[in-house]
Structures are given as C-alpha cells and as structure tokens.
C-alpha cells in the first residue's frame, strides 16, 4: 500500500472533500517500457485544476491527479533501455494514467528525463510539464530553430509569468536567440519575466496590438499564447507578421475566425504536451530527449529553474492550497510540494 492524494467527487477547491489523503495499492512490478518511480516532489499545473473542476461525475476508487514529478527509479520493466534502479528522473507523465500525487508511480521511460544534477528534487519537479510544453510549442509546432538559425526574429509570449511562460522565455532567448516580448500586468510579474530574460514587457490587460505599436514593434514573427486565446485572437491576427506563426495552449471558449490569418498566409497550431503519450506516437521518445536537453541547459547555467515556492509535505491540505492559488490567477513561476509525512 502507499500514500496518495485523490478524489472521489469533482468539487470546488474550498470543499475539504475535493482532494483527500488516501491509502491505495502500490503499483505492481513494471512491464514493458515502464519505470516504477518513488516520488520525492511534485508540482501543480492548470491542467490539474481543470480536471478537478466541479462536475457531476463520481469515482468508485480515488482518482489520483498530478502531472509533474521528480523521484528515483526503484524498478524497471523488461523493455527499458535508458534507465536503471537508482537513477534520479523527472517527468510530466501521461494524462491517461494515474497521476504523480502518490508515493510511487508507473511511467513510460520514453517520456522521462534524467534529472538536472544541479537541482534538488523539489526544484526539478517544477520543470517537466512546462518545459515539454514550451519546447514543443517553440521548436516542434512553430518550427523555430533550436540551433539559433532564427536569431533576431521576434516572439511575443502572452501570459509570460506563469510556469510555461517562465521556461519558454528562457528557451526562446537562450536557445533560439530570439527577441522576446513578454506580457505581464503587475509589478511583480514584470520583474519576474525580466529575470527570465524578456527583452521587453507589455501589458496584456490592454489591447496587445496597440501595446506592440507603442514599443515600435507592430508585428512579430511568432506568438505563443498562454492565456485566453479567444480574447486575444483579433489582436494576435493583427500583430502576427506575414507568414508568421501563432501557437496556443489554451482552448477557446468562443469560435475564432481563422480567416483573419489568410491574407498573411500565417499559420496556427495547438500545443498539448500529452499528445505523444496519449496516442503512443512513433516519436514519443522526443519528450525524453528534450527533457535531457533542458537538464543539460540547467546544469550548464544556460537555463534556470522556475520554482517560486515549495511547501512540505505532499498532502491533500497543501494541494488544496496550491489549487486555490492557481485558480486565483496570481501564480508566478511554479509552486512545488516535497516529501511525505
């Protein structure tokens, strides 16, 4: 048996029953490409709050959420090629399987990276989901060169102070060598995105296309939208350069007019970091590769961690606090939970 945090009902986070401390079966011996990982630290992302959001559905067994973890490999499946017992790893996991809010977890080695050696478990747990999302959005979806061949081109990141924006800013600046324009609306978030490497900062509470004109950059080559896709759509369509590319990670609540991009031959892509694991794509090992590249960047001092706060221990009470904080819309960087009672 093992400790975990799970849910039976999908409730408002203010309800103490929304996330519960539970005892569940420890996973059995790993099969295939699976690793059995002893989890030392986890972090929380907006996807956790969206899946936990109130709805009528109920669970007969506790559902374990969580898609960010760092820990130690304690067993390996017969087909595992890249890891051994004792390796320190970090990963976001697979949304179709049990999550990381538990003492032990089975995870496919092809979506697992070797933990940065210069970080502790808590610092490492802040990085996987956001790093995968940012890397795939920039380099896979928008086709930006990870070798610096697009150096000097412009990227606008809408909602840059959150977890994805924090690492995307660094990847775009340090790896791709782009000119990064970040959006932030409060003094503390402005300071944070500058610390992450943003060249310029504009306010997303105003019309973004007008904000760009005010800094003499009316059009940008790339836009990464991390907040309110439909709200910003018209401004993004105005601001994207001819033959530019927009990528978003936020589903629309209202229909958007793709026709606004036609005269510019501009492109639009979605980024959903769970796609490769959900559909067992032929290239799913790319997530292992990119996580290892991020770890190398951290260890070489090219990239920096994005953990803003750590709470101890991993518990339902602390997870409810973080869910509530994320739902407030005021999160900066990443909040992490570490250790079990």
Image: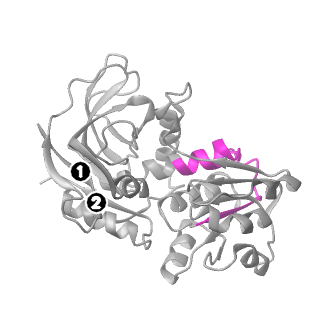
Q: Which residue is mark 2?
A: 11
Q: Secondary structure at mark 1?
A: strand
* Image-based side of 322 in relation to 94, left or right: left
> What residue would you read off at disc 1?
7
181 within the magenta span: no
Camera-near label (2 vs 1) is 2
- Does 263 sit left or right of 135 as displayed? right
Gap between marks 2 and 1 measured at Cα: 9 Å
Circle 2 SS class: loop
Residue for point 20% across, 26% down? 28
Q: Residue furthest top?
A: 78
Mark 2 touching mark 1, by CB under 8 A? Answer: yes
Rendered-image quadrant of the C terminus: bottom left
Q: Position of residue 156 (x, y in %)?
A: 68, 64
Q: Quadrant of residue 260?
A: bottom right
How crowded is the residue under tag 1: few (<14 C-alpha within 10 Å), some, or many (20+)? many
Residue that extends furthest to the front in the rendered view of this protein = 56
* Residue plotted at (39% across, 40% down): 93
In magenta, the rendered stretch is 133-158
User: Relative to 282, does residue 142 appear above or below in the rendering?
Assistant: below
């Amino acid at each position: 048996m093992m400790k975990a945090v799970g849910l039976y009902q999908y409730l408002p986070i203010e309800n103490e029953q929304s996330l519960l401390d539970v005892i569940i079966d420890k996973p059995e011996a790993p099969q295939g490409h699976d690793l059995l990982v002893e989890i030392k630290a986890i972090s929380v992302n907006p996807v956790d709050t969206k899946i936990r959001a109130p709805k009528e559905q109920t669970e007969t067994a506790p559902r374990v959420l969580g898609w960010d973890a760092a820990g130690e490999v304690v067993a390996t499946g017969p087909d595992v090629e890249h890891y051994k017992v004792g390796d320190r790893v970090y990963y976001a996991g697979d949304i179709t399987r049990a999550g990381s809010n538990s003492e032990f977890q089975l995870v496919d080695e092809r979506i697992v990276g070797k933990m940065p050696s210069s970080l502790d478990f808590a610092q490492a747990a802040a990085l996987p989901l956001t790093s995968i999302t940012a890397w795939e959005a920039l380099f896979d979806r928008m086709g930006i060169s990870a070798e610096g061949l697009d150096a000097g081109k412009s990227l606008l990141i809408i909602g840059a102070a959150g977890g994805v924006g924090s690492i995307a800013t660094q990847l775009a600046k340090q790896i791709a060598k782009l000119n990064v324009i970040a959006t932030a609306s409060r003094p503390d978030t402005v300071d944070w995105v500058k610390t992450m490497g943003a060249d310029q900062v504009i306010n997303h509470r105003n019309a973004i296309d007008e904000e760009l004109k005010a800094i003499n950059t009316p059009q940008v080559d790339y836009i990464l939208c991390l907040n309110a896709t439909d709200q910003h759509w018209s401004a993004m369509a105005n601001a994207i350069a001819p033959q530019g590319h927009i990528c978003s990670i936020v589903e629309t609540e209202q229909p958007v007019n793709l026709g606004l991009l036609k005269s510019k031959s501009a492109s639009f892509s979605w980024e959903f970091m769970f796609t490769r694991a959900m559909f067992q794509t032929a290239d799913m090992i790319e997530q292992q590769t990119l996580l290892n590249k991020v770890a190398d960047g951290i260890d070489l001092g090219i990239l920096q961690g994005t953990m803003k706060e750590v709470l101890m221990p991993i518990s339902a009470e602390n997870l409810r606090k973080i869910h509530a904080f994320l739902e407030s819309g005021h999160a900066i960087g990443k909040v992490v939970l570490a250790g079990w009672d």
